[in-house]
Image: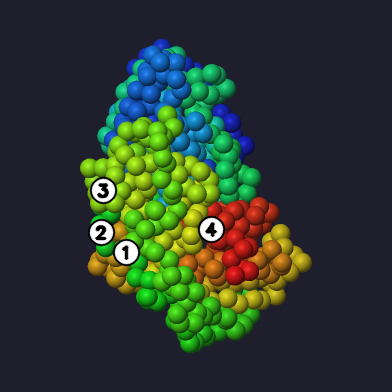
Amino acid sequence: MAAAQGAGSSSAGPSGLPGSAPGHSNNSTAVAVWEWQDEFGRWRPYRGNVCSYIEQVFQASQQKGRRSGSGLVSSIPLGHADPVLAPYVIDIPSLTQFRQDTGTMRAVRRHLFPGDSAAGQGIVWEWQNDEGGWSPYEMNVCVFLEQARATNHQRVDLGPLGYNYEVDFVAQVQTNKTTRFRRSIQRRLDAPYPVTASPAPLHAGPACSCQQCWLNSGTGPITTRYRHSMINFPNSSTTHQVSGRTASVSSSSVGFVPYNKPALSGARSTSRLNAQSTWALPQAGATSTGLSASNGVSTPNLTVKMPKPSKVNQALAATPTEPEAVVKKYLEEVKGSPADEDCIICMEKLSSPSGYSDTCECSTIKPETVGRLTNCQHSFHMLCMLAMYSNGNKDGSLQCPSCKTIYGEKTGTQPKGKMEVSTFPQSLPGHKDCGTIQIVYHISRGIQGPEHPNPGMPYTARGFPRYCYLPDNEKGRKVLELLRVAWKRRLIFTVGTSSTTGESNTVVWNEIHHKTEMDTNLSGHGYPDPNYLDNVLAELAAQGVTEDCLRQ
């Protein structure tokens, strides 16, 4: 079933519902909910314990700033709250979440709710996705629904909140006002969010243009992460619920729990990527059978083949992958006193020892040693960079946590599989002047390798083969060639947790979005979409896959 469309024409909430029109509460007790914005414009709350940590650091920084006159803390490493979140850092000035091992950026916001609201009571409202799992509504929708339930309303319209749905509390269903498609809903009790002091009367309903709403719901800059179309920009009036065909990123559907990545480990741990292995790449000499295109035209598939050994593995074999060697290759030691600034990895002053000195030991790098990346010139504790590198797949590349510059050739953890390409004459909506490129990805279930979240455990591969589409024009063919490079570098898929089903140890998309539908864009994964090719080129570039790769 196609996903929901945008907001309907209805602009009024249920009669008599508190909060259906903007208003403010005199209750000064508030809870702070920190949320991150996914690729469909939805705000997903971090879990309560993570929000508590973020809020604690944020408040301490504000108090310190008021006393000393200095600015706010520049970034908050989420690994301090939950080891699973070790790759993630929140940059406070830009209100952006940065994933250090992939360079992915997402907007974040801090939103205050009354202490007696759903957020303060730990009440979460959820809708059932196509796979049978449960996905939470945005927190402001949860608050709205809980208010309606508390005042004995049997049905509410979510139009004022940007959703094209009606919710029936008696039948416990959500109905799309355009298609009349229905989904089940549920109310669940979870841990409450952290209490904080509210500097102004709290907003009790949907966001308006008052100063309190503006200050407490900022989204930071719009980045290339808001893809597919203009309707998915932050603060859009359209919010989508995603079908099972979603090309999703690896994050949990409840709160913020990406794949079960281990905590930052010691530098002496064994390398997780065998430079001589070709087990995760298409095998040379692989045969391909013709696949029927969606329009009934059957054409030969062009299998992406790789000679043995591949250029990727040759590069890895020639590149030092031992953690200490990689860090010393790309960082030069800073002599003398370092700058009076924080290391954004551990949040300690550069003049102080690394905050990871108790979990990452190295005989050749001292905790107080500061290094500067050779190209972008950003400085960090060298032991922090060692810990960050050791926590990844140790492929011989580094990515600057500050500006995302990639040093070396970045590779991923994509399991073994096959990529097939074919063309057919049918045009995609919005590209009437050309035919269509069809990409088919084949990945089977298997056993996780040492670079995956749970080495030795099985992983599943749901929904394969996966069919994806590009226009067969100059830019589409350019994207195709770069996707070939990304496939060879194991960057298109990874093993993690599905954002739609919550299943862990399964193959998921990895930050490079694909169009998995031809003739509908209700879910954001079809055509027409005039921005898609430019957006996916930007995503590929963020992974270090650019036109320069095609000239090598």
Contact between marks 2 and 3 (CB within 8 A): the answer is: no
Tell me the amino acid under the disc marked 3. Cys
Tell me the amino acid under the disc marked 4. Gly
Residue under numbered circle 4: 544
Q: Nearer the viewer, residue 152 or 202?
A: 202
Contact between marks 1 and 2 (CB within 8 A): the answer is: yes
Q: Nearer the viewer, residue 199 or 263?
A: 263
Contact between marks 2 and 4 (CB within 8 A): the answer is: no
Q: Residue at x 24, y 67 (%)?
A: 456
Q: Residue at x 41, y 45 (%)?
A: 333
Mark 1: few/some/many CA within 10 Å (<14, 14-19, 20+)? some
Q: Position of residue 507 (x, y in %)?
A: 39, 64
Q: CA distance from mark 1 to mark 3?
A: 17 Å
Residue under numbered circle 2: 269
Tell me the amino acid under the disc marked 1. Arg
Q: Nearer the viewer, residue 31 or 262?
A: 262
Name the element at disc 2: loop
Labels 1 and 3: the sequence-earlier one? 1
Residue under numbered circle 1: 272
* Eye-nearest disc, 4 or 3: 3
* Eye-nearest disc, 1 or 2: 2
Name the element at disc 1: loop
Contact between marks 4 and 3 (CB within 8 A): the answer is: no
Relative to 449, 341 lies left or right: right
Labels 1 and 4: the sequence-earlier one? 1
Mark 2: few/some/many CA within 10 Å (<14, 14-19, 20+)? few
Q: Position of residue 408 (x, y in %)?
A: 48, 60
Q: Which mark is residue 360?
A: 3
Mark 4: few/some/many CA within 10 Å (<14, 14-19, 20+)? many
